[in-house]
Image: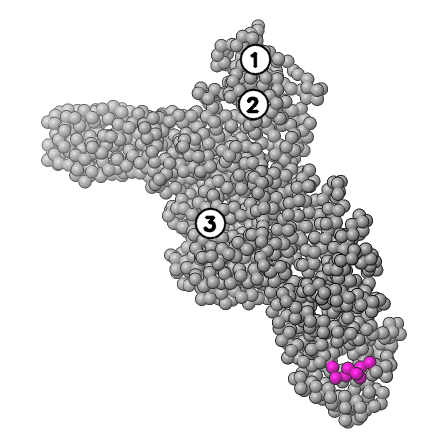
């Protein structure tokens, strides 16, 4: 059994090709098979004899018939539907399948009595689409007989008559009566029996002929007479008799024999003897010498002499037409071009036909054959060969479910194998409680097997509960990702690697982040990740959309969509499917036949296309359904049209399921609740039935291809996600809930007390069963799993699990309020880490309310101070003070017992930030300063970093600029600074670098922030760093970059922050429009509208400026009248006065003198807003414009020249040109 | 009281073997028959199967139950009693249970199932006849066990469930009729 990680089993190893040589419908040989010792006998009543010579009890008549049918068809697969059609034509398929299954079970027990119930059957095997008996010719008496008859015939015609008797004697003794004597009336037995009798007759004739050749003339004559007694119409025997008598010197008797023959034929058949026999009569009369030699122009003694039956090409038995038509075509596209079935170790995993041996695919342009997918394969082949040369990447294959993504991945795997790449499969699990990083855990496990300890170490870190040394979550996550990337790169450096990651739409957020992290570097690593994504699911998951978006921006990432078949491709597909039976056991792909069993009936093709929309999985399932009701070579367009298939593929699956025994259906439904991968132990425990019976009940699902066996036949897997989904969707909510509860309990019991590795899966199942009495377990497992997820650095999963724990909390349970409060705080904290500021605040607000009501001071404080952690901006909307929170914090401060300085510092710092936007800002500044002082005394660098950050925000005013900057600088000197704190501190000191014109230093900080952000990947931080980069591009006049970055920034801002995405985006757009000298156009009404909102104070001057630029001064004045011209002395001040300055210079409002008073002292500085989202040149320009407005042209020129000089010095070309133009204007007066 | 699945929903009923001794949860349906059987036969030869809903509460009583006595050496089994809980009646669950049982016995190598017809109970007989059981006078049951209990009347259980009781009749005026089916 494979190692179980977190209660999940890794998918069956798929590194190689088909797991055994038996794929393709037939079993190859029985080396080591359990059936080696058994002997199957049909030359008489059906009998199976073991090694000791004892006949086995093979059961009732029907059971024997099942065995006989399988034997006659061996070693080919006999389709389940065919078997049922032969023996239970009158019964509904579901009950007949159950009965058949019971017989199969019992037969296995008899044939392999020592097989343990958990090991796969080796003799009577299940192979989609049915069963096969894995026996060799030598194990069947009829097979031995046919072989011996053929040998004897060859000996005789080779002139070695003395060998004939020795060869035939033992096999003739094996005849115990009529072949299959116990099935005299069964249509399936008759042709075989007749054929065997014929073979025996021929063999006896050959033996008699050999006697004649050895001169045993009298014996030959006696034998010929005896044989004629059995079949008097054989002229060959008459000829033999005549020749034997002649050679025995009994010419008269020879001629009399001829007369007897002639009379018999004439009287009974109205025929004359054949010319050959007449020639023989003549020869006897003439005493022809030829009569003494071997051979001659006489009727051959046996048809087999001329035309040997021999062992049939397709079976064990001497049956020229096989007893049943070739089996596999009826199963239609089972292993044909696009099988829906997923991978299954040792199963009938369809592998596309390689057109050439290993090493040649791809590089030589010879591709596996896959209908309709040639362009995809060609591109994949190119990417693979690039990967082999060290340039990997991410290749995303998208498409609707059932469209053949996995199939394409399999073809890619084959190509990669041919190119010498190591191929690794992994699969994301759908909502069945997979642990974080699940797909990567699989990848590392597979690669680790052949590698040293590095991958193992990463694997350990992904799965162990120890968060490692770095307590800072973001650093820890970066280090983990980095370690994974390095280990994988090093592994790929040995041999290039193709990672096939399936169903990425179900990947956990942590795995997606790791994928995007890796993706950035893969273009220079010989590792290609081929990820399959179900399109319709991608839209529903923001984490996935974000990851795909980010991947697409990376070098080396490519997306390709797989689309539905066209009618022409369906025709092609049918042709391929039809050729399947011709595939020899050893070949790995279908041999193309000119026509499949469907021919090229265009009406059929169109009917199938209409019905399935060209979806290959749907097509395959539909053909299987059709095959189960009639032989596919007879299927026509009308059958497709008349089939009671109302709509989609789910209906087809439902119909296929309904053909199974009811108990099998019930069990499959329970299995669907477990997930796509079905742990048989869990299913056994959940269903309360024994393992043997469970296997028996699931057999028909395996035989019909709904389920595949993995792990050496013990565990199962749904052949396609849609099969599981259909079964699951068919259950009512109550049924699902109950079943999830059972499954959860089964897993719990199987874990025997140690559930640490199964927390996510337990949280999942009990969560789904919360409403049916499992809420306590659901909550407890979710909370434990959340803690575990956080320790694995999978923060998004932790958020989801805390949310789940809250959702399942039973409000009626005792202490539910305090439990809820505790969970809300954890949720707030977890959301904060993922950058979900809005969500965090919602949770924490509720926690504060709840804790206040409960009188739980500790909880209130804890909740209230989560936000006081290191943060970039105040966390409220612009200009808002949350008076309630202020009250809570003050209240808590008043109640703090002396000595709890740490908690006090946190509260004071938090309060300092909370008061920032109000009239009590100065008071808040003092609180923050006191917090810093307390932290300094405590000697705790983390507390100091936190309070300094509080202080930085509390002092973000023009007056406190020096202190603000200094505090930010101090943070950067602290030891063990978390990455996020460092980025934030840098973002706070960077504006000062910019306004002072220290652009080199600014750029260095920005570059470091960008690099660290790509490691940390916190959306909140990413947004602001991107904004800073936007501002920097604006300063440099790179407008395309401005547009690009501001779009990215505002997009990610929208997901993370409380206030301003639209405001900032609009501002960026307006300023760049103004800067480029373009008319504001439709921006003007938007600005005017946005300015109406008091929280958008900062864009009012920009709106007025836009009105002026648009030539609508009247509007500009009206807006000024309505809004006033205030400039708040907060983080927006510098930008706002700059904008008002520009307005004033044009329309004289606000008062230019007042603005000059504000701006002149800082005229030599550059402009920036907040942490740099908008940046511009020296304020000297604006001062110059204001001075000109007030008639002080000389001073104006001096400022303009200074601006020109600044811009020239800083290399800001577009600003330099503007300043130069202004200087010219002023000089020209 | 079990609540039967709404019609139209996929069923999640599954045949399960439960220990054949008095007091096994969910076997109240057959309690009297079981008691009778255990007086005549070693417990090891009695098997009880229930049709239980996988998607029902674990403690819910089964939809139907059946009691058989097996003779492994002879590859025979005797069906002693079969009952369907009232809420599940007239919906084919008896037939379903019987089919499941026969499948199970067949998989165990049983070749022949017999049932001693009870003149006062037509329900099970009709079910068996429609499932291919045929009459065999005298039957394979062997010598009668004198003094075997005969609680073959319909029995009221708490006024809620009516339990069929199928058991051997004492030697009476009626001819013994065995219903038999080869598997």
Front position in the image: A887 or A931: A931
Residue A539: x %, y % from top left? 64, 56
Q: Residue at x 70, y 83 (%)?
A: A1215
Q: CA distance from mark 1 to mark 3?
A: 58 Å
Chain ID at mark 2: B
**Which disc is residue A13 wearing?**
3
Q: CA distance from mark 2 to mark 3?
A: 43 Å
Name the residue beneath numbered marker 2.
B20
Respond whether the residues carrying marks 2 and 3 are from the same subunit: no
Name the residue beneath numbered marker 1.
B168
Q: Residues within 10 Å of mark 1 (few under 14, many from 20)?
A: many
Q: Residue at x 43, y 52 (%)?
A: A16
- Viewer-side label of 2, 1: 2
Residue A1164: within the magenta?
yes
Respond whether the residues carrying marks 2 and 1 are from the same subunit: yes
Instruction: Identify the element where label 3 is drawn.
Output: loop
Q: Residue at x 66, y 41 (%)?
A: A777
Which portion, as a residue range, is magenta? Answer: A1158-1165
- Answer left or right for A1179 relative to A299: right
Respond whether the residues carrying marks 1 and 3 are from the same subunit: no
Residue A408: within the magenta?
no
Q: Is residue B145 above or below residue B46?
A: above
Q: Are marks 2 and 3 in contact (CB under 8 Å)?
A: no
Instruction: Identify the element where label 1 is drawn.
Output: loop
Res. A812 visible in picture: yes
Quarter of the image for residue B54 reads: top right
């Amino acid at each position: 059994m494979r190692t179980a990680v977190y209660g999940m089993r890794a998918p069956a190893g798929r590194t190689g090709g088909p797991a055994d040589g038996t794929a393709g419908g037939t079993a190859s040989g029985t080396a080591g098979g359990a059936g080696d010792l058994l002997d199957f006998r049909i030359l008489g009543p059906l009998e199976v004899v073991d090694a000791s010579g004892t006949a086995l009890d093979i059961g009732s008549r029907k059971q024997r018939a099942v065995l006989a049918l399988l034997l006659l068809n061996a070693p080919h697969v006999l389709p389940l539907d065919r078997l049922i059609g032969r023996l239970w034509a009158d019964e509904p398929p579901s009950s007949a399948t159950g009965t058949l299954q019971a017989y199969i079970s019992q037969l296995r027990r008899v044939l392999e009595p020592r097989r343990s119930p958990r090991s796969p059957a080796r003799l009577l095997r299940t192979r989609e689409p049915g069963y096969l008996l894995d026996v060799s010719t030598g194990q069947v008496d009829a097979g031995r007989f046919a072989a011996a008859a053929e040998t004897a015939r060859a000996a005789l015609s080779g002139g070695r008559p003395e060998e004939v008797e020795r060869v035939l004697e033992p096999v003739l003794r094996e005849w115990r009566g009529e072949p299959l004597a116990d099935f005299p009336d069964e249509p399936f037995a008759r042709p075989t029996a007749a054929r065997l009798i014929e073979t025996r007759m021929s063999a006896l004739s050959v033996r008699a002929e050999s006697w004649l050749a050895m001169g045993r003339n009298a014996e030959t004559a006696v034998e010929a007479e005896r044989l004629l007694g059995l079949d008097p119409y054989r002229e060959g025997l008459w000829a033999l008799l005549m020749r034997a008598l002649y050679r025995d010197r009994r010419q008269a008797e020879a001629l009399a024999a001829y007369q007897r023959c002639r009379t018999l034929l004439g009287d009974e058949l109205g025929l004359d003897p054949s010319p050959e026999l007449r020639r023989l009569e003549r020869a006897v009369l003439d005493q022809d010498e030829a009569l003494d030699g071997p051979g001659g122009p006489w009727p051959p003694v046996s048809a087999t002499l001329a035309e040997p039956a021999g062992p049939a090409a397709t079976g064990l038995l001497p049956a020229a037409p096989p007893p049943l038509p070739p089996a596999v075509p009826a199963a239609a596209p089972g292993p044909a071009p696009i099988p829906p079935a997923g991978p299954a170790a040792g199963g009938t995993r369809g592998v596309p036909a390689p057109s050439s041996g290993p090493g040649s695919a791809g590089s030589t342009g010879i591709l596996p054959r896959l209908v309709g997918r040639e362009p995809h394969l060609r591109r994949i082949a190119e990417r693979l060969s690039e990967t082999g040369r060290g340039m990997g990447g991410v290749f995303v294959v998208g498409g609707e479910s059932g469209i053949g993504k996995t199939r394409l991945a399999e073809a890619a795997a084959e190509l990669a194998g041919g190119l010498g790449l190591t191929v690794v499969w992994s699969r994301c699990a759908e909502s069945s409680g997979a642990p974080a990083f699940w797909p990567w855990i699989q990848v590392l496990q597979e690669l680790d097997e052949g590698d040293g300890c590095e991958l193992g170490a990463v694997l350990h870190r992904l799965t162990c509960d120890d968060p490692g040394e770095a307590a800072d979550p973001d650093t820890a996550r970066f280090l983990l990702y980095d370690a994974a990337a390095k280990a994988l790169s090093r592994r790929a450096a040995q041999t290039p690697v193709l990672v096939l990651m399936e169903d990425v739409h179900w990947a956990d957020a942590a795995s997606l982040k790791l994928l995007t992290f890796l993706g950035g570097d893969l273009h220079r690593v010989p590792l290609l990740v081929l990820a399959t994504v179900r399109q319709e699911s991608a839209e529903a998951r923001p984490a996935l959309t974000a990851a795909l978006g980010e991947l697409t921006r990376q070098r080396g990432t490519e997306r390709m969509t797989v689309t539905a078949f066209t009618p022409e491709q369906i025709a092609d597909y049918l042709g391929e499917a039809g050729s399947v039976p011709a595939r020899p056991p050893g070949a790995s792909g279908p041999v193309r036949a000119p026509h499949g069993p469907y021919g090229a009936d265009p009406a059929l093709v169109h009917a199938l296309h209409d019905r399935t929309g060209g979806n290959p999985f749907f097509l395959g399932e539909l053909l299987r359904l059709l095959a189960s009701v009639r032989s596919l070579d007879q299927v026509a367009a009308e059958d497709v049209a008349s089939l009671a298939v109302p709509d989609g593929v789910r209906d087809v699956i439902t119909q296929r399921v309904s053909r199974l025994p009811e108990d099998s259906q019930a069990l499959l439904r329970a299995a669907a609740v477990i997930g796509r991968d079905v742990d048989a132990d869990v299913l056994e425990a959940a269903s309360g039935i024994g393992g043997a019976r469970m296997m028996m009940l699931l057999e028909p699902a395996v035989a019909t291809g709904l389920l595949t066996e993995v792990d050496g036949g013990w565990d199962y897997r749904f052949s396609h996600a849609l099969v599981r989904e259909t079964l699951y969707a068919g259950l009512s909510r109550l049924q699902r809930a109950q079943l999830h509860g059972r499954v959860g309990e089964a897993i719990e019991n199987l874990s025997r007390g140690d559930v640490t590795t199964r927390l996510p899966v337990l949280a999942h199942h009990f969560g789904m069963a919360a409403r049916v009495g499992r809420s306590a377990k659901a909550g407890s497992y979710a909370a434990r799993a959340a803690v575990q997820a956080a320790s694995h650095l999978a923060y998004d999963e932790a958020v989801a699990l805390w949310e789940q724990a809250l959702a399942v909390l039973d409000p009626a349970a005792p202490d539910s309020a305090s439990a809820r409060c505790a969970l809300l705080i954890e949720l707030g904290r977890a959301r904060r880490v993922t950058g979900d500021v809005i969500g965090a605040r919602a949770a924490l607000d509720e926690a504060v309310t709840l804790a206040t009501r409960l009188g739980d001071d500790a909880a209130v404080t804890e909740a209230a101070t989560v936000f006081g952690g290191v943060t970039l901006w105040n966390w409220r909307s612009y200009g808002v003070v949350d008076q309630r929170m202020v009250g809570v914090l003050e209240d808590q401060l008043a109640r703090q017992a002396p000595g709890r300085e740490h908690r006090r510092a946190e509260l004071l710092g938090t309060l300092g930030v909370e008061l920032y936007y109000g009239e009590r800002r100065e008071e808040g500044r003092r609180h923050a300063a006191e917090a810093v002082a307390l932290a300094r005394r405590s000697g705790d660098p983390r507390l100091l970093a936190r309070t300094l950050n509080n202080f930085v925000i509390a002092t973000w005013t023009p007056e406190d600029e020096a202190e603000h900057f200094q505090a930010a600088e101090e943070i950067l000197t602290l030891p063990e600074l978390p990455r996020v704190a460092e980025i934030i501190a840098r973002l706070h000191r960077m504006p000062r670098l910019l306004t002072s014109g220290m652009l080199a230093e600014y750029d260095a900080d920005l570059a470091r922030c960008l690099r660290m952000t790509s490691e940390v990947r916190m959306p909140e931080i990413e947004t602001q760093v991107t904004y800073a980069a936007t501002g920097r591009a604006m300063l440099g006049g790179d407008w395309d970059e401005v547009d690009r970055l501001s779009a990215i920034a505002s997009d990610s801002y929208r997901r993370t922050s409380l206030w301003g995405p639209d405001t900032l985006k609009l501002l960026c757009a307006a300023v760049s429009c103004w800067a480029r000298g373009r008319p504001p156009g439709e921006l003007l009404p938007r600005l005017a509208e946005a300015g109406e909102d008091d929280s958008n104070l900062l864009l009012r001057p920009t709106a007025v400026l836009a009105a002026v630029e648009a030539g609508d001064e009247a509007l500009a004045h009206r807006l000024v009248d309505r809004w006033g011209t205030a400039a708040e002395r907060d983080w927006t001040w510098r930008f706002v006065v700059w904008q008002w300055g520009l307005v004033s210079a044009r329309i004289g409002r606000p008062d230019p003198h007042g603005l000059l008073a504000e701006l002149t002292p800082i005229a030599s500085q550059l402009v920036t807003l907040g942490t740099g989202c908008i940046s511009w040149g020296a304020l000297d320009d604006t001062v110059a414009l204001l001075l000109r407005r007030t008639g002080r042209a000389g001073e104006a020129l001096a400022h303009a020249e200074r601006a020109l000089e600044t811009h020239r010095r800083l290399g800001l070309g577009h600003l330099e040109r503007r300043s130069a133009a202004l200087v010219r204007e002023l000089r020209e007066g | 009281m079990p609540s039967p699945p709404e019609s139209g929903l996929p069923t999640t009923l599954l045949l399960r073997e439960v220990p054949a001794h008095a007091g096994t949860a969910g076997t109240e349906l057959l309690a009297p028959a079981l008691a009778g059987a255990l007086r005549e036969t070693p417990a090891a030869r009695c098997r009880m199967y229930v049709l239980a809903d996988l998607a029902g509460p674990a403690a819910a009583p089964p939809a139907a139950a059946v009691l058989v006595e097996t003779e492994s050496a002879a590859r025979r089994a005797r069906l002693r009693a079969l009952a369907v809980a009232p809420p599940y009646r007239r919906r084919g669950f008896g037939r379903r249970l019987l089919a499941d049982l026969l499948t199970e016995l067949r998989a165990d190598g049983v070749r022949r199932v017999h049932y001693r017809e009870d003149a006062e109970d037509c329900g099970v007989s009709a079910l068996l006849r429609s499932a291919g059981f045929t009459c065999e006078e005298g039957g394979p049951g062997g010598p009668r066990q004198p003094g075997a209990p005969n609680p073959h009347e319909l029995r009221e259980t708490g006024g809620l469930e009516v339990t069929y009781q199928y058991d051997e009749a004492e030697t009476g005026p009626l001819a013994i009729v065995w219903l038999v089916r080869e598997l």
